[in-house]
Amino acid sequence: MDPTALPSFSYKEKVYGISFAGYKVYWYYYNKKIFKDLGLKAPTTYQEFKDVCAKINATGVTPVYEGMQNGWHQVLPLFETGGNYLESDPKIYDKLNSNEVNIKDVKGIKTVLTQLKEFQTLGYFGKDFMSNTVEGGKKAFADGKAAIVLDEFGWEQNLAKDFPATKDNVGVFIQPWGDNKELGINPASNAYFANAKSENKDEAVKFFRYLVKKEVLQKRLDGDPNSLQICWPEIKAKYPQSYTDYIATLKKATVVQVGVKYIDPQWMDVGKDIAAMYSGAMTPDDVMNSISKRRDDQAKLQKDPNWVK
Amino acid sequence: MDRNKTYPWYFASGALLLFFILCFIPSVIGVFYSFTDWNSFSDKVSFVGFDNFKTIFIGDKSYLTFIGNTVYFTVFTTALKTILGLIFALLFTRGIKLANFHRMVIFSPQVLSYLIVGLVFKGMLHPSTGFLNIFLDKIGLDFLSNDWLGSIKYAFPAVMAVDTWKGVGYGMVIFIAGIQGIPESYYEAASLDGAGFMQKTLKITLPLLMPTLIMTTVLNVTYGLRVFDIIYVLTNGGPGYATDVMNTAVFKEFSRGNYAVGTALSTLLAVFTMAISYFILKALNKKEEY
């Protein structure tokens, strides 16, 4: 199994379950024609991202499509770029979980928030982004009204099904917020577990061993039209060779919401904080404090020994 | 009143029993839970005194904002629904043509679910593809276009407008029933004395409509304080926290597993609603003699 998937069903480095779903990745899809016409290259740093968006914005096209109505999409840049925070401190996830470090002191997160606010101020999300939905991104991209969309693996293939004219016109690049250079992997998905006290635990283990046979894994991937990959590297993914080649150049890291406790349960609240930040009711510091407070509240509610002595 | 023809008390006992078991007792139990640390992460429930209420009033300023938003929403929508409902009722009881048709049109939003209304208006109020802004643009009033649900300035007024549109018909039908109960002879006598429409409305209609006004005001206030559906569907309390009210906060606390704080908020809301209803009934209760 892909080692990045293991933490989702492991405890104190012992693996307790088995999973098959491919990891989730959120990255940017861009309109190749718009980029080619403007002489642009896929950005790899925040400054390059800003410059690319400035040139696209000048043509009247929305540089980056954002759908705030769903409430969760705007949080992705903050926590999907966890690899960037780990680059600065490889033990940051552990330190946050042991309450050795307060999340509001993680400078990288504040940097991303500040950059998001800058993008909003410069109008790079367009003027209607507060009322847009994530689902509207496909049409906006296909109509040429938005040049870049943040979405997950499989979006390009679904886009081509709904808008065949977009086929071969889509490129990808990882989120460059905070000069991030790592691919954020979310391995969390459904997993199989067996009850250790069950009478049939041996049969359960036999069943698991059957499920991980190469031919069975291949059948699992072939049989699901919506899945591009499974978390077993020996089974070749269905995504294009261009993805494979690009991913091979990237370091991978687990996203914050999987590696750090008390983040995922407050995802929608962070979304509201970011919306408040965009509307001017909160500052990036306010958002950081809000995230930290909710983490503390959740930890105390669950009587986490790292919070409640 | 012919007391021989009134129903005996035990005819209502079934409904009262159900209300007592399913509504009253859980509410009282809820009050006790609001003094505990009840949550989804532990089976153990411990008494914590007023900690949850301290969190609401002192610990986190956002709760006070939610309470403020709830009161603001209640006052404005109650006033709008009452005034507009009364105006429509007066209009549609004055021999206007197709009165029944007009009443049906104004009342019909009341029969739609909040989910349907919310989804429809979300589309209609979209800044670039919504019907409202496109219409304003077509008639040369594009300077009035706004991001109705995405702007911190207009989101709450927009939500209140949608809620008023949906609820005004309910008050209207109650007022129509009240107006139709006023004897016509009073208006005839007033006409003979030379009274105009406004005088008749102020001196006859409104005083005799007082019991109806009390009832609709109490209904609108209790609805406003308990509002959730229309806000959840239209904005989910956004943008940011601009349209969050007490019940969206209760929903959030329960979603987080913090049942005790959610229950404390609900308890506050229940006490506040009962107190406001009592004072409104006392303040507006004037008996008019025929």
Image (cartoon, coloured by chain):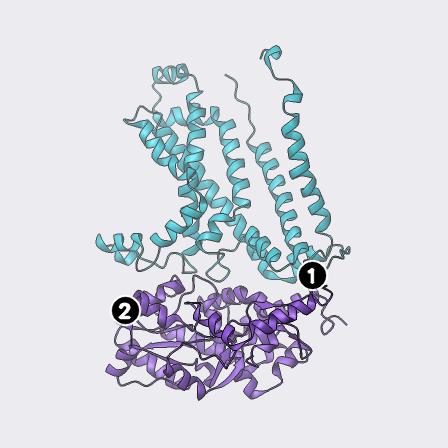
Chain colours: A purple, B cyan
Q: Name which residue type carries label 1.
A: Phe
Q: Is residue A125 visible?
A: no
Give the distance between the C-alpha atoms of the residues marked 1 and 2, in whole angstroms: 48 Å
In the rendered image, residue B243, in percent from the top left (x then y), is placed at: 49, 55
Q: Quadrant of residue A292?
A: bottom right
Dot 2: chain letter: A
- Foreground residue among A243 and A76: A243
Q: Which mark is residue B41?
A: 1
Give the residue at x 40% y 51%: B119
Does A101 sit left or right of A214 as displayed?
Answer: right
Judge whether A29 appears above or below B224 on screen. below
In the rendered image, residue A47, in percent from the top left (x then y), is placed at: 40, 85
Judge whether B168 appears above or below B32 on screen. above
Q: Which residue is mark 2?
A: A164
In the rendered image, residue B15, in percent from the top left (x then y), is placed at: 63, 29
Q: Name which residue type carries label 2.
A: Pro
Mark 2 crowdedness (10 Å alpha carbons): few <14, some 14-19, many ≥20: few
Give the residue at x 59% y 53%: B250
Q: Secondary structure at mark 2?
A: helix
